[in-house]
Amino acid sequence: MSDTSAAAYWKANVRVISICMAIWALVSFGFGIILRPLISGIPIGGTDLGFWFAQQGSILTFIALIFYYRWYMNKLDRKFDVDE
Protein backbone atom coordinates (compact mmCIF):
# COMPACT_ATOMS: atom_id res chain seq x y z
CA MET A 1 0.00 0.00 0.00
CA SER A 2 1.44 3.38 -0.97
CA ASP A 3 1.67 6.35 1.38
CA THR A 4 -1.26 8.07 -0.33
CA SER A 5 -3.53 5.04 -0.08
CA ALA A 6 -2.38 4.44 3.52
CA ALA A 7 -3.42 7.99 4.40
CA ALA A 8 -6.78 7.52 2.66
CA TYR A 9 -7.27 4.20 4.47
CA TRP A 10 -6.64 5.70 7.91
CA LYS A 11 -8.71 8.77 7.10
CA ALA A 12 -11.64 6.48 6.24
CA ASN A 13 -10.97 4.48 9.42
CA VAL A 14 -11.08 7.59 11.62
CA ARG A 15 -14.18 8.82 9.80
CA VAL A 16 -16.14 5.61 10.41
CA ILE A 17 -15.08 5.56 14.08
CA SER A 18 -16.23 9.17 14.47
CA ILE A 19 -19.55 8.44 12.79
CA CYS A 20 -20.14 5.35 14.96
CA MET A 21 -19.38 7.24 18.16
CA ALA A 22 -21.68 10.10 17.12
CA ILE A 23 -24.50 7.67 16.35
CA TRP A 24 -23.98 5.92 19.69
CA ALA A 25 -24.01 9.24 21.56
CA LEU A 26 -27.21 10.38 19.85
CA VAL A 27 -29.01 7.08 20.39
CA SER A 28 -27.89 6.91 24.02
CA PHE A 29 -29.05 10.48 24.50
CA GLY A 30 -32.39 9.61 22.92
CA PHE A 31 -32.87 6.56 25.10
CA GLY A 32 -31.71 8.29 28.28
CA ILE A 33 -33.22 11.75 27.95
CA ILE A 34 -36.26 11.29 25.74
CA LEU A 35 -37.52 7.69 26.10
CA ARG A 36 -36.63 7.12 29.75
CA PRO A 37 -38.96 9.79 31.21
CA LEU A 38 -41.80 8.64 28.95
CA ILE A 39 -41.86 5.10 30.30
CA SER A 40 -40.32 5.48 33.74
CA GLY A 41 -42.33 4.46 36.75
CA ILE A 42 -43.34 1.12 35.27
CA PRO A 43 -41.70 -1.55 37.44
CA ILE A 44 -40.59 -4.71 35.68
CA GLY A 45 -38.39 -7.40 37.17
CA GLY A 46 -37.42 -5.22 40.12
CA THR A 47 -36.19 -2.32 37.99
CA ASP A 48 -37.73 0.69 36.33
CA LEU A 49 -38.72 0.05 32.71
CA GLY A 50 -37.41 3.44 31.58
CA PHE A 51 -34.00 2.81 33.12
CA TRP A 52 -33.88 -0.69 31.63
CA PHE A 53 -34.63 0.57 28.10
CA ALA A 54 -32.08 3.36 28.43
CA GLN A 55 -29.38 0.99 29.60
CA GLN A 56 -30.10 -1.91 27.24
CA GLY A 57 -30.71 0.34 24.24
CA SER A 58 -27.35 1.99 24.70
CA ILE A 59 -25.55 -1.33 25.08
CA LEU A 60 -27.29 -2.95 22.10
CA THR A 61 -26.58 0.08 19.92
CA PHE A 62 -22.91 -0.05 20.89
CA ILE A 63 -22.71 -3.76 20.03
CA ALA A 64 -24.45 -3.19 16.68
CA LEU A 65 -22.01 -0.40 15.85
CA ILE A 66 -19.06 -2.68 16.65
CA PHE A 67 -20.37 -5.18 14.10
CA TYR A 68 -20.96 -2.38 11.58
CA TYR A 69 -17.42 -1.09 12.12
CA ARG A 70 -15.95 -4.55 11.56
CA TRP A 71 -18.00 -5.02 8.37
CA TYR A 72 -16.96 -1.61 7.07
CA MET A 73 -13.30 -2.20 7.88
CA ASN A 74 -13.40 -5.53 5.99
CA LYS A 75 -14.83 -3.61 3.05
CA LEU A 76 -12.02 -1.03 3.31
CA ASP A 77 -9.40 -3.77 3.63
CA ARG A 78 -10.57 -5.28 0.35
CA LYS A 79 -10.74 -1.88 -1.35
CA PHE A 80 -7.20 -0.90 -0.30
CA ASP A 81 -5.83 -4.45 -0.61
CA VAL A 82 -4.72 -4.64 3.03
CA ASP A 83 -3.42 -7.95 4.34
CA GLU A 84 -3.63 -8.67 8.03
Image (cartoon, helix red, strand yellow):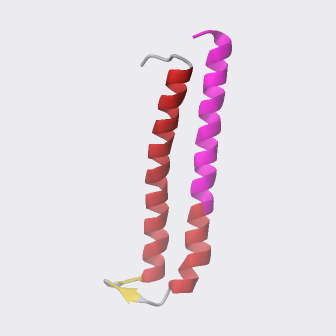
Residue at 48 percent across and 80 percent down: it is 50
Residue at 57 percent across and 83 percent down: it is 37
Would you say residue 6 sits in the magenta stretch?
Answer: yes
Q: Is residue 69 above or below residue 40?
A: above
Quadrant of the snapshot with the N terminus: top right
Q: Is residue 56 above or below residue 19?
A: below
In the image: residue 80, left or right of residue 83: right
Quarter residue 18 falls in: top right
Question: Which residue is situated farthest in the top direction here?
Answer: 2
Place of residue 38 in the rendered image (x, y in percent of width and height, measured from the top left): 57, 85
Across the whole image, how many numbered discs are drawn on residues?
A: 0
Front-most of residues 33 and 1: 1
Quadrant of the snapshot with the C terminus: top left
In the image: residue 41, left or right of residue 29: left
Chief secondary structure of the magenta portion: helix
Quarter residue 45 falls in: bottom left
Q: Is residue 18 above or below residue 33?
A: above
Would you say residue 46 sits in the magenta stretch?
Answer: no
Residue at 56 percent across and 64 percent down: it is 28
Residue at 42 percent across and 83 percent down: it is 48
Magenta-drawn segment: 1-26
Place of residue 33 in the rendered image (x, y in percent of width and height, measured from the top left): 61, 74
Q: Is residue 40 above or below residue 7?
A: below
